[in-house]
Amino acid sequence: MGRLAELVGDQMYGEKSRTFIFSDEGHTLGNALQFIISQYPDVEFCGYTVPHPAETKMHFRIQTKDGPAADVLRRGLEDLKKVCDHTLETFYEACKEYKSA
């Protein structure tokens, strides 16, 4: 994964509302992360945009009901990693089972 930054000027909205900028990322991470984070009960809004196709940046916005948006982002990334690990494990087990049959 690329680098991560917060949008300048976002501080005036408090810790509950932030826009994070992911470098070298796009719709693949944005869509998966939005799917996971939008299901959290403490999230008011979650969305992403890729400002321009020629740029390799993704803006990811989180607004929470309570608690820092950065904590929700961290939890979302951890949960997405768990989903990916489970998917890989299931795939490898199915391949192993297929080859032994």
Image (tube, helix red, strand yellow):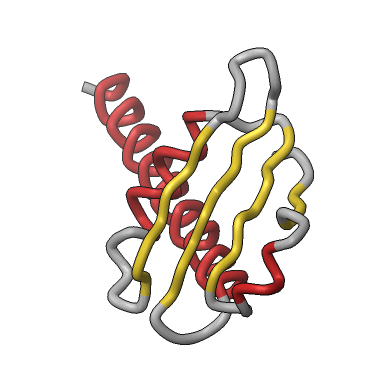
**Where residue 41 sits: x, y (%)?**
28, 75
**Where residue 18 sits: x, y (%)?**
60, 64
Q: Nearer the viewer, residue 11 or 61?
A: 11
Quadrant the C terminus occupies? top left
**In the image, what residue occupies the spot 35% across and 29% down?**
96
Task: Locate residue 10 relative to residue 47 in the image: left or right.
Answer: right
**In the image, what residue occupies the spot 72% across and 54% down?**
7
Q: Looking at this view, name the residue that lies furthest to the top.
A: 54
**Where residue 17 sits: x, y (%)?**
54, 69
Quadrant the N terminus occupies? top right
**In the image, what residue occupies the spot 33% across and 26% down?**
95
**In the image, what residue occupies the spot 68% across and 46% down?**
21
Q: Quadrant of residue 65?
A: bottom left
Report the label total: 0
Q: Nearer the viewer, residue 33 or 64?
A: 64
Rendered position, 51 above or below 40: above
Rendered position, 90 above or below 26: below
Task: Locate residue 57 relative to residue 82 in the image: left or right.
Answer: right
Task: Locate residue 57 relative to residue 28 in the image: left or right.
Answer: right
**Where residue 32 sits: x, y (%)?**
40, 42
Q: Nearer the viewer, residue 90 or 48?
A: 48
Q: Looking at this view, name the residue that lies furthest to the bottom.
A: 66
Q: Quadrant of residue 79?
A: bottom left
